[in-house]
Image: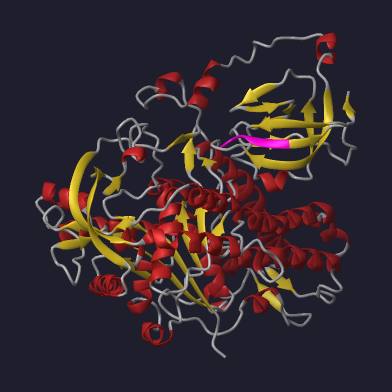
Amino acid sequence: MMAEKFYITTPIYYVNDVPHIGHAYTTIAADILARYNRLKGKKVFFLTGTDEHGQKVEKAAQGKGLSPKEHADIMVENFRALWKKLNITNDAFIRTTDMEHIKTVQGLIQLLWDNGEIEKRQYSGWYCTPDERFWTEKDLVDGNCPDCGRAVEQIREENYFFLMSKYQDRLIKYIEDNPSYISPETRRNEVLGFLKNNTLGDLCISRPKARLAWGIPFSFDETFVTYVWFDALVNYFSATRYLAPHAEMARLGDFWWPADHHLVGKDILTTHAVYWSTMLMALNLPLPKNIFAHGWWTVDGKKMSKSFGNVVDPNVMAEKYGADAFRYFLFREVPFGLDGNFSEEALISRTNTDLANDLGNLLSRFLTMAEKYFSSIIEIPAGSSTELNPFAGECMYAMIPAVDDTHSADWSNLRFNIILDHIWSIIRAGNNHVAQKEPWKLAKTDVQELKSVMFNIWNALRLSAVALYPFMPDTAEKMWKQLGLKSLADETKQSLPGTLPPEANKYPKIYEWDWKPGYEIKVSKGEQLFPRIEVKKETGKEKEGKGPMTESEQVSAERKPEEINLITIEDFAKVQLKIGAVLQAERVPKSAKLIKLQVDTGEMRQVVAGIGQVYAPEDLVGKSIVVVTNLKPAKLMGVESQGMLLAATDSNGILSIVAPEKEVKAGAVIK
């Protein structure tokens, strides 16, 4: 029986770009999914690469006195080097200048032409050179490109058009019939709204060679080259023909196509959900199983931009804090489908709290006690099975949703932060076990019980290492070896990029065991996983020359702790606080932060809160919150708010909703 396949893609990145956090975010997500599915025993094909045609590449090369291909050969190494630094295990790296890709693009255009899906016509439109695309008059914003805001020029020329408009109704029906085709649901609704409220036009897929020489020529008309987006989208299919493991099998049986996930940023969702989907329909090819559009990372709520001087360089973050800490932060901090606010302060806080204190400290304490009490020998005690050992059962219960997609939808829905929370429940359980059992006391009173406790901690760490492997491969490998086990990659038969793993699910072998009581394992201390990061507080003089302060820094600088406005008990009594139960929650359109809540506070009221960058609406339904109920109603982005929920932010700006410790009836007054 042939193993199940898993095909995951990132967008191909524009070769002129300097790799930034957005590129890293998508690619690490794909790597996490690839590693996880390899461990599940699937045949995995993980594809990334670069988009190397177009006017901007041509102009950049001319400025350096190079050919476009020579320029691309240099620039592509920026991406290859970053993926190596971030421990990315892509199976292939496609370049749109690959000859096999070029042949595939030409072949598909020829097929569309032969089938009457392309026609040649005169076209007049407003052209944006930086974005390399045409716009209609109504698309323009103040006479400029709606995407980049730069000037456009009117061009009238003959071009080839893909008859995309004929597939509008079919695409709407497909998206409605296949709810998981576009994720998250908010993005699916955006695409459906776009398709239902606009008339889809035909897509210009050519540029005259006289105006743009650097592109893939049409096989039936070499005076035209292919529009870069058409060329780029085909990479997902063309790679299966010549780059995938066992590519010859793909040619015979289309083993790899369709893709399981196309991971994209939300800014290119329409291109994939509309252009690519209709192209595949016209070619009679299956559509990908899922297109997942993730959010953006911002700084102080602003989109990263060179002009703002706030672009985060993933090379610097990996070098400064380590690849694993950077990977962990990106996927623990914010749900994958939402926008997130990036700050080094938050990254340091996560590293110190979760990685150094919780994980690193548990491993360090365990290894120190093992050395002190048992000369670093851990013995499998009698009654170590999950049936006889409640703690082992607790850890196993937490482990299952973190590794088994048949028992949880977290993996299929790409809820990386929730999966990491499952893993941290194992780590927290290990720390609580140490605190409750107090091994240092057992060493004096009950050595047999101490052996059982030490095994339990060892097992919690072992399970954590396995579950962390897709997210933090270096850390998991270090833990595995210090716990006295073989290389995690060897133990799980982890395949190398470009090879096919054995056809078996590795996870049951890892998180279950058949070791008999008395079996001994030699553990050993190694390097500290995550040394605590000490933050030096900068004086005003040290801050000089480092550019303008961010908004959050300005607020901190202006805040004087001694300036406290004292109020009387009568003043406080004027504020009416009640417990509210959230019954419904939805995003406020066109806002990244605002969520509209329907709350039961003894009576129904609508509350609008700026918590959307931290909480997803579906995660709020059912929660109990604290609401100020006697505030004068106010409108936020045109939506009335009839109260205010209470939330707190820590020193790093991380927000948490204030909630009662125990279940309290909705409408209860807080005194």
Tell me the quadrant of the picture where the C terminus can be found. Answer: top right
Classify residue 456 as left or right of residue 662.
left
Q: Residue at x 38, y 60 (%)?
A: 164
Number of numbered discs overlaid on the protein picture: 0
Near-viewer residue (458 or 75): 75
Residue 129 visible from this viewpoint = yes
Q: Quadrant of residue 545?
A: top left
Furthest-bottom residue in this view: 1
| Display coloring | secondary structure
Q: Could you tell me residue 129's position as x and y percent?
A: 23, 45
Foreground residue among 339 and 604: 604
Q: Residue visible at 72% across and 59% down? A: 426
Quarter of the image where one finds residue 577: top right
Q: Quadrant of the N terminus?
A: bottom right
* Location of residue 360 with respect to 285 vertically, above or below: above
Task: Identify the residue shown where x is 80% and y is 24%.
Answer: 629
Q: Residue furthest left?
A: 65
x, y percent for residue 160: 24, 60
Region rendered in magenta = 592-597
Q: Nearer the viewer, residue 422 or 269?
A: 269
In the rendered view, tell whether residue 442 sits above or below residue 643. Answer: below
Can I make out residue 487 in this image?
Answer: no
Question: Is residue 4 depicted above or below 530 in this figure?
Answer: below
- In the displayed structure image, the side of residue 281 where residue 144 appears, left or right: left
What percent of the width, then of the height, locates residue 143?
A: 30, 32
Left or right placement of residue 316 versus residue 426 in this view:
left
- Nearer to the camera, 622 or 149: 149
Compared across the picture, whether 5 is left or right of 632 comes to left
**x and y, in percent, of residue 363 in the image:** 65, 58
Q: Is residue 605 magenta?
A: no
Q: Is residue 595 magenta?
A: yes
